[in-house]
Image (spheres, rainbow, N blue to C red):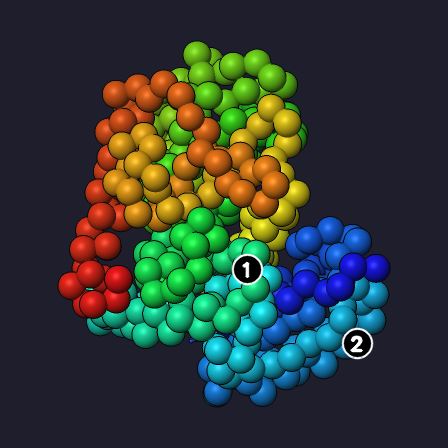
Amino acid sequence: MASPVNVVVTGAAGQIGYALLFRIASGQLLGEDTPVRLRLLEIPQAVKAAEGTALELEDGAFELLDGVDVFDDAAKAFDGANVGLLVGARPRTKGMERADLLEANGGIFKPQGEALNGAADDVKVLVVGNPANTNALIAASNSDVPKDRFTAMTRLDHNRGLAQLANKFGVGVGQISKLTIWGNHSASQYPDVSNVLVDGKPVADQIDQGWLTDEFIPRVAKRGAEIIEVRGASSAASAAAAAIDHVYTWTNGTKPGDWTSAAIVSDGSYGVPEGLVSSFPVTAEGGKWKIVQGLDVSDFSRERIDASVAELAEEREAVTKLGLV
Ligand code: NAD
Ligand code: LMR
Protein backbone atom coordinates (compact mmCIF):
# COMPACT_ATOMS: atom_id res chain seq x y z
CA MET A 1 0.00 0.00 0.00
CA ALA A 2 1.06 3.61 -0.65
CA SER A 3 2.61 5.63 2.17
CA PRO A 4 0.11 7.64 4.23
CA VAL A 5 -0.99 11.11 3.19
CA ASN A 6 -0.79 13.71 5.99
CA VAL A 7 -4.12 15.52 6.33
CA VAL A 8 -4.34 18.49 8.70
CA VAL A 9 -7.76 19.56 9.95
CA THR A 10 -7.88 22.83 11.87
CA GLY A 11 -10.83 23.47 14.18
CA ALA A 12 -10.94 19.70 14.55
CA ALA A 13 -13.02 19.84 17.76
CA GLY A 14 -15.73 21.94 16.10
CA GLN A 15 -18.93 20.71 14.52
CA ILE A 16 -17.63 20.54 10.92
CA GLY A 17 -14.49 18.81 12.19
CA TYR A 18 -16.60 16.13 13.86
CA ALA A 19 -18.56 15.50 10.67
CA LEU A 20 -15.40 15.52 8.54
CA LEU A 21 -12.83 13.42 10.35
CA PHE A 22 -14.61 10.06 10.23
CA ARG A 23 -15.27 10.38 6.51
CA ILE A 24 -11.59 11.17 5.88
CA ALA A 25 -10.59 8.17 7.99
CA SER A 26 -12.85 5.92 5.93
CA GLY A 27 -11.13 6.93 2.68
CA GLN A 28 -13.71 9.29 1.21
CA LEU A 29 -11.36 12.28 0.91
CA LEU A 30 -8.62 10.74 -1.21
CA GLY A 31 -9.94 7.36 -2.29
CA GLU A 32 -10.08 3.87 -0.93
CA ASP A 33 -6.48 3.00 -1.81
CA THR A 34 -4.92 5.88 0.10
CA PRO A 35 -3.99 5.57 3.78
CA VAL A 36 -4.17 8.77 5.79
CA ARG A 37 -2.54 10.16 8.89
CA LEU A 38 -4.79 12.73 10.55
CA ARG A 39 -3.37 15.80 12.27
CA LEU A 40 -5.84 17.71 14.38
CA LEU A 41 -5.02 21.36 15.10
CA GLU A 42 -6.94 23.19 17.80
CA ILE A 43 -6.57 26.10 20.17
CA PRO A 44 -5.26 25.04 23.60
CA GLN A 45 -8.73 25.23 25.25
CA ALA A 46 -10.14 22.72 22.73
CA VAL A 47 -7.22 20.28 22.61
CA LYS A 48 -8.87 17.97 25.16
CA ALA A 49 -12.04 17.73 23.06
CA ALA A 50 -9.89 16.99 19.98
CA GLU A 51 -8.12 14.26 21.95
CA GLY A 52 -11.54 12.77 22.70
CA THR A 53 -12.33 12.72 18.99
CA ALA A 54 -8.95 11.04 18.39
CA LEU A 55 -10.01 8.27 20.79
CA GLU A 56 -13.21 7.80 18.83
CA LEU A 57 -11.28 7.70 15.57
CA GLU A 58 -9.19 4.91 17.05
CA ASP A 59 -12.40 3.08 18.00
CA GLY A 60 -13.59 3.31 14.39
CA ALA A 61 -10.89 0.74 13.46
CA PHE A 62 -10.52 2.35 10.05
CA GLU A 63 -8.19 0.26 7.93
CA LEU A 64 -6.90 3.32 6.06
CA LEU A 65 -6.18 5.35 9.20
CA ASP A 66 -2.46 5.25 9.93
CA GLY A 67 -2.73 7.37 13.09
CA VAL A 68 -4.00 10.58 14.68
CA ASP A 69 -1.94 13.39 16.22
CA VAL A 70 -3.33 16.39 18.09
CA PHE A 71 -1.57 19.78 18.06
CA ASP A 72 -2.01 23.29 19.34
CA ASP A 73 0.99 24.52 17.35
CA ALA A 74 0.41 25.29 13.66
CA ALA A 75 4.07 24.88 12.64
CA LYS A 76 4.17 21.35 14.05
CA ALA A 77 0.77 20.40 12.62
CA PHE A 78 1.57 21.56 9.06
CA ASP A 79 5.10 20.11 8.97
CA GLY A 80 5.06 17.75 5.97
CA ALA A 81 1.31 18.22 5.39
CA ASN A 82 -0.10 17.08 2.04
CA VAL A 83 -3.63 18.40 2.58
CA GLY A 84 -4.70 21.28 4.83
CA LEU A 85 -8.38 21.71 5.63
CA LEU A 86 -8.55 25.09 7.33
CA VAL A 87 -11.88 24.91 9.12
CA GLY A 88 -11.21 26.66 12.44
CA ALA A 89 -12.06 30.34 12.33
CA ARG A 90 -13.27 33.08 14.59
CA PRO A 91 -17.05 33.40 14.34
CA ARG A 92 -18.67 36.81 14.35
CA THR A 93 -19.92 37.63 17.85
CA LYS A 94 -22.34 40.28 19.07
CA GLY A 95 -21.26 43.84 18.36
CA MET A 96 -18.41 42.73 16.09
CA GLU A 97 -18.02 44.72 12.86
CA ARG A 98 -16.87 43.07 9.63
CA ALA A 99 -13.44 44.72 10.01
CA ASP A 100 -13.11 43.25 13.53
CA LEU A 101 -13.96 39.84 12.11
CA LEU A 102 -11.36 40.18 9.36
CA GLU A 103 -8.75 41.29 11.89
CA ALA A 104 -9.54 38.40 14.28
CA ASN A 105 -9.27 35.91 11.42
CA GLY A 106 -6.07 37.56 10.23
CA GLY A 107 -4.65 36.50 13.60
CA ILE A 108 -5.42 32.88 12.64
CA PHE A 109 -4.78 32.68 8.88
CA LYS A 110 -1.57 34.77 8.75
CA PRO A 111 0.36 32.44 11.10
CA GLN A 112 -1.21 29.39 9.43
CA GLY A 113 -0.06 30.68 6.00
CA GLU A 114 3.45 31.02 7.44
CA ALA A 115 3.29 27.58 9.04
CA LEU A 116 2.33 26.07 5.69
CA ASN A 117 5.89 26.84 4.50
CA GLY A 118 6.82 23.59 6.22
CA ALA A 119 4.22 21.58 4.27
CA ALA A 120 5.00 19.06 1.53
CA ASP A 121 5.61 20.40 -2.01
CA ASP A 122 2.30 19.01 -3.22
CA VAL A 123 0.19 20.52 -0.43
CA LYS A 124 -3.43 21.32 -1.24
CA VAL A 125 -5.12 23.88 1.00
CA LEU A 126 -8.88 24.32 1.34
CA VAL A 127 -10.15 27.16 3.50
CA VAL A 128 -13.62 26.52 4.93
CA GLY A 129 -13.61 28.93 7.88
CA ASN A 130 -15.41 32.18 7.13
CA PRO A 131 -14.96 34.65 5.55
CA ALA A 132 -13.45 31.79 3.53
CA ASN A 133 -12.31 33.62 0.38
CA THR A 134 -10.50 36.39 2.24
CA ASN A 135 -9.09 34.01 4.84
CA ALA A 136 -7.58 32.06 1.93
CA LEU A 137 -6.19 35.29 0.52
CA ILE A 138 -4.56 36.09 3.88
CA ALA A 139 -3.05 32.60 4.18
CA ALA A 140 -1.77 32.64 0.57
CA SER A 141 -0.30 36.15 0.97
CA ASN A 142 1.69 35.10 4.02
CA SER A 143 3.11 31.91 2.61
CA ASP A 144 5.85 30.88 0.19
CA VAL A 145 3.64 28.01 -1.00
CA PRO A 146 2.59 28.65 -4.63
CA LYS A 147 -0.72 30.53 -4.85
CA ASP A 148 -2.39 27.82 -6.91
CA ARG A 149 -2.27 25.52 -3.86
CA PHE A 150 -4.74 27.78 -1.96
CA THR A 151 -8.48 27.49 -2.44
CA ALA A 152 -11.66 28.44 -0.59
CA MET A 153 -14.88 26.47 -0.45
CA THR A 154 -17.86 27.29 -2.66
CA ARG A 155 -18.61 23.61 -3.34
CA LEU A 156 -21.36 23.73 -0.71
CA ASP A 157 -23.04 26.54 -2.66
CA HIS A 158 -22.57 24.50 -5.85
CA ASN A 159 -24.15 21.43 -4.23
CA ARG A 160 -27.03 23.54 -2.89
CA GLY A 161 -27.66 24.85 -6.39
CA LEU A 162 -27.59 21.34 -7.88
CA ALA A 163 -30.17 20.17 -5.33
CA GLN A 164 -32.50 23.10 -6.05
CA LEU A 165 -32.26 22.50 -9.81
CA ALA A 166 -32.86 18.76 -9.40
CA ASN A 167 -36.05 19.58 -7.44
CA LYS A 168 -37.15 22.07 -10.07
CA PHE A 169 -36.66 19.68 -13.01
CA GLY A 170 -37.78 16.57 -11.13
CA VAL A 171 -34.49 14.77 -11.87
CA GLY A 172 -31.57 13.39 -9.85
CA VAL A 173 -28.65 15.68 -8.99
CA GLY A 174 -26.40 13.50 -11.16
CA GLN A 175 -28.40 14.53 -14.23
CA ILE A 176 -27.49 18.22 -13.80
CA SER A 177 -24.19 19.60 -15.06
CA LYS A 178 -22.38 22.89 -15.72
CA LEU A 179 -23.74 24.97 -12.88
CA THR A 180 -21.43 27.79 -11.78
CA ILE A 181 -21.01 29.70 -8.55
CA TRP A 182 -19.17 33.00 -9.12
CA GLY A 183 -17.56 35.31 -6.56
CA ASN A 184 -17.65 35.23 -2.78
CA HIS A 185 -18.97 32.56 -0.39
CA SER A 186 -21.46 35.09 0.95
CA ALA A 187 -24.95 36.30 0.15
CA SER A 188 -23.46 38.27 -2.78
CA GLN A 189 -22.43 35.09 -4.64
CA TYR A 190 -23.94 34.46 -8.08
CA PRO A 191 -25.27 30.98 -8.81
CA ASP A 192 -25.34 30.98 -12.62
CA VAL A 193 -27.61 28.62 -14.59
CA SER A 194 -26.76 30.01 -18.07
CA ASN A 195 -24.87 26.88 -19.10
CA VAL A 196 -26.74 24.27 -17.07
CA LEU A 197 -27.52 21.00 -18.80
CA VAL A 198 -30.10 18.43 -17.73
CA ASP A 199 -29.23 15.04 -19.19
CA GLY A 200 -26.75 16.84 -21.44
CA LYS A 201 -29.34 19.27 -22.89
CA PRO A 202 -29.38 23.05 -22.31
CA VAL A 203 -32.29 24.24 -20.15
CA ALA A 204 -31.61 27.99 -19.69
CA ASP A 205 -34.47 28.83 -22.09
CA GLN A 206 -36.93 26.84 -19.99
CA ILE A 207 -36.05 28.69 -16.78
CA ASP A 208 -38.49 31.41 -15.86
CA GLN A 209 -36.77 34.72 -15.01
CA GLY A 210 -39.01 35.29 -12.00
CA TRP A 211 -38.10 31.91 -10.50
CA LEU A 212 -34.43 32.61 -11.17
CA THR A 213 -34.24 36.06 -9.57
CA ASP A 214 -36.85 35.68 -6.81
CA GLU A 215 -36.34 32.06 -5.80
CA PHE A 216 -33.29 30.21 -7.08
CA ILE A 217 -30.56 32.82 -6.70
CA PRO A 218 -31.57 34.09 -3.22
CA ARG A 219 -32.35 30.55 -2.02
CA VAL A 220 -28.85 29.30 -2.85
CA ALA A 221 -27.06 32.49 -1.81
CA LYS A 222 -28.86 32.71 1.54
CA ARG A 223 -29.07 28.99 2.29
CA GLY A 224 -26.40 29.28 4.99
CA ALA A 225 -28.60 31.76 6.89
CA GLU A 226 -31.68 29.57 6.33
CA ILE A 227 -29.87 26.57 7.86
CA ILE A 228 -28.79 28.66 10.87
CA GLU A 229 -32.38 29.79 11.38
CA VAL A 230 -34.01 26.38 11.00
CA ARG A 231 -31.34 24.20 12.58
CA GLY A 232 -30.23 26.66 15.24
CA ALA A 233 -26.59 26.19 14.20
CA SER A 234 -24.63 26.68 11.00
CA SER A 235 -24.39 23.90 8.44
CA ALA A 236 -21.94 21.21 9.48
CA ALA A 237 -22.44 17.81 7.82
CA SER A 238 -23.26 19.37 4.43
CA ALA A 239 -20.21 21.62 4.76
CA ALA A 240 -18.06 18.59 5.61
CA ALA A 241 -19.50 16.70 2.63
CA ALA A 242 -18.66 19.63 0.33
CA ALA A 243 -15.10 19.79 1.68
CA ILE A 244 -14.71 16.09 0.89
CA ASP A 245 -16.10 16.67 -2.63
CA HIS A 246 -13.73 19.61 -3.22
CA VAL A 247 -10.54 17.76 -2.28
CA TYR A 248 -11.67 14.52 -3.95
CA THR A 249 -12.30 16.38 -7.22
CA TRP A 250 -9.04 18.35 -6.94
CA THR A 251 -7.15 15.07 -6.50
CA ASN A 252 -9.08 12.79 -8.86
CA GLY A 253 -10.38 15.20 -11.51
CA THR A 254 -13.79 16.47 -12.64
CA LYS A 255 -16.29 14.24 -14.44
CA PRO A 256 -15.85 14.31 -18.24
CA GLY A 257 -18.18 16.90 -19.80
CA ASP A 258 -18.81 18.69 -16.52
CA TRP A 259 -17.20 21.30 -14.33
CA THR A 260 -17.58 22.36 -10.71
CA SER A 261 -17.14 25.53 -8.67
CA ALA A 262 -14.19 26.42 -6.46
CA ALA A 263 -12.75 29.68 -5.20
CA ILE A 264 -9.20 29.94 -6.50
CA VAL A 265 -6.68 32.76 -6.91
CA SER A 266 -7.80 34.75 -9.95
CA ASP A 267 -5.52 35.06 -12.96
CA GLY A 268 -7.70 37.92 -14.27
CA SER A 269 -10.14 35.63 -16.13
CA TYR A 270 -13.66 37.01 -16.69
CA GLY A 271 -12.54 40.46 -15.47
CA VAL A 272 -11.97 39.26 -11.88
CA PRO A 273 -8.95 41.25 -10.62
CA GLU A 274 -5.82 39.17 -10.38
CA GLY A 275 -5.02 37.82 -6.93
CA LEU A 276 -8.57 37.84 -5.52
CA VAL A 277 -9.76 34.44 -4.30
CA SER A 278 -12.99 34.15 -6.27
CA SER A 279 -15.27 31.30 -7.25
CA PHE A 280 -15.16 30.28 -10.92
CA PRO A 281 -16.32 27.42 -13.11
CA VAL A 282 -13.36 25.04 -12.88
CA THR A 283 -12.16 21.67 -14.02
CA ALA A 284 -9.48 19.64 -12.27
CA GLU A 285 -6.87 17.49 -13.96
CA GLY A 286 -3.60 16.07 -12.68
CA GLY A 287 -4.08 17.78 -9.30
CA LYS A 288 -4.52 21.26 -10.80
CA TRP A 289 -7.57 23.50 -11.14
CA LYS A 290 -8.22 25.20 -14.45
CA ILE A 291 -10.78 27.98 -15.03
CA VAL A 292 -13.23 27.09 -17.81
CA GLN A 293 -12.58 29.67 -20.50
CA GLY A 294 -14.63 31.20 -23.30
CA LEU A 295 -18.10 31.23 -21.70
CA ASP A 296 -20.49 33.94 -22.86
CA VAL A 297 -21.41 36.27 -20.01
CA SER A 298 -24.76 38.04 -20.39
CA ASP A 299 -25.40 41.54 -18.99
CA PHE A 300 -27.55 39.91 -16.27
CA SER A 301 -24.65 37.69 -15.24
CA ARG A 302 -22.03 40.43 -15.59
CA GLU A 303 -23.83 42.67 -13.14
CA ARG A 304 -24.06 39.92 -10.53
CA ILE A 305 -20.49 38.68 -10.95
CA ASP A 306 -19.24 42.27 -10.66
CA ALA A 307 -21.23 42.87 -7.46
CA SER A 308 -19.78 39.83 -5.70
CA VAL A 309 -16.26 40.53 -6.96
CA ALA A 310 -16.60 44.14 -5.72
CA GLU A 311 -17.29 42.74 -2.24
CA LEU A 312 -14.13 40.60 -2.48
CA ALA A 313 -12.13 43.66 -3.55
CA GLU A 314 -13.48 45.58 -0.53
CA GLU A 315 -12.47 42.74 1.78
CA ARG A 316 -8.99 42.73 0.23
CA GLU A 317 -8.72 46.48 0.77
CA ALA A 318 -9.76 46.07 4.42
CA VAL A 319 -7.18 43.36 5.15
CA THR A 320 -4.52 45.27 3.23
CA LYS A 321 -5.13 48.26 5.53
CA LEU A 322 -4.73 45.91 8.50
CA GLY A 323 -1.34 44.80 7.12
CA LEU A 324 -2.54 41.21 6.66
CA VAL A 325 -1.78 40.85 2.96
P1 NAD B 1 -17.26 25.54 15.39
O1 NAD B 1 -17.30 26.82 16.18
O2 NAD B 1 -18.09 24.38 15.79
O3 NAD B 1 -15.75 25.03 15.35
C1 NAD B 1 -14.67 25.87 15.07
C2 NAD B 1 -13.46 25.28 15.78
O4 NAD B 1 -12.32 26.02 15.37
C3 NAD B 1 -13.52 25.37 17.31
O5 NAD B 1 -13.34 24.08 17.86
C4 NAD B 1 -12.37 26.30 17.67
O6 NAD B 1 -11.75 25.97 18.90
C5 NAD B 1 -11.46 26.09 16.47
N1 NAD B 1 -10.46 27.17 16.25
C6 NAD B 1 -10.60 28.51 16.42
N2 NAD B 1 -9.44 29.13 16.16
C7 NAD B 1 -8.55 28.19 15.80
C8 NAD B 1 -7.17 28.21 15.44
N3 NAD B 1 -6.49 29.35 15.42
N4 NAD B 1 -6.59 27.04 15.13
C9 NAD B 1 -7.25 25.88 15.18
N5 NAD B 1 -8.55 25.80 15.55
C10 NAD B 1 -9.19 26.93 15.85
O7 NAD B 1 -17.53 25.99 13.88
P2 NAD B 1 -17.96 25.06 12.65
O8 NAD B 1 -19.43 24.98 12.63
O9 NAD B 1 -17.15 23.85 12.66
O10 NAD B 1 -17.56 26.02 11.44
C11 NAD B 1 -16.21 26.35 11.18
C12 NAD B 1 -16.12 27.48 10.17
O11 NAD B 1 -16.63 27.06 8.91
C13 NAD B 1 -16.92 28.72 10.54
O12 NAD B 1 -16.13 29.85 10.21
C14 NAD B 1 -18.13 28.67 9.62
O13 NAD B 1 -18.67 29.94 9.36
C15 NAD B 1 -17.47 28.08 8.38
N6 NAD B 1 -18.37 27.49 7.38
C16 NAD B 1 -18.02 27.63 6.06
C17 NAD B 1 -18.80 27.08 5.07
C18 NAD B 1 -18.43 27.23 3.61
O14 NAD B 1 -19.23 26.77 2.77
N7 NAD B 1 -17.32 27.80 3.22
C19 NAD B 1 -19.94 26.36 5.42
C20 NAD B 1 -20.25 26.19 6.77
C21 NAD B 1 -19.45 26.77 7.75
C1 LMR C 1 -22.93 28.28 5.15
O1 LMR C 1 -22.90 28.63 3.96
O2 LMR C 1 -23.69 27.38 5.56
C2 LMR C 1 -22.06 28.98 6.16
O3 LMR C 1 -21.04 29.67 5.52
C3 LMR C 1 -22.89 29.88 7.00
C4 LMR C 1 -22.13 30.52 8.13
O4 LMR C 1 -22.25 31.76 8.28
O5 LMR C 1 -21.44 29.82 8.88
Residue 43 visible to an observer of this rendering: yes
Task: Name which residue lies at 41% across and 37% down.
Answer: 280
In this view, the residue in front, 312 or 77, is 77
In the picture, which quadrant includes the N terminus?
bottom right
In this view, the residue in front, 171 or 300, is 300
- Identify the residue under disc 2: 59
Q: Please, what secondary structure does the residue beneath circle 2 have?
A: helix
Task: Name which residue lies at 72% across and 81% down.
Answer: 55
Q: Is mark 2 within 8 Å of ligand 1?
A: no
Quarter of the image where one finds residue 285: top right
Residue 26 at x, y percent in the picture: 75, 60
Residue 146 position (above or below residue 88)? above
Residue 284 at x, y percent in the picture: 56, 38
Farthest left residue? 321
- Identify the residue under disc 1: 121
Residue 152 visible to an observer of this rendering: no
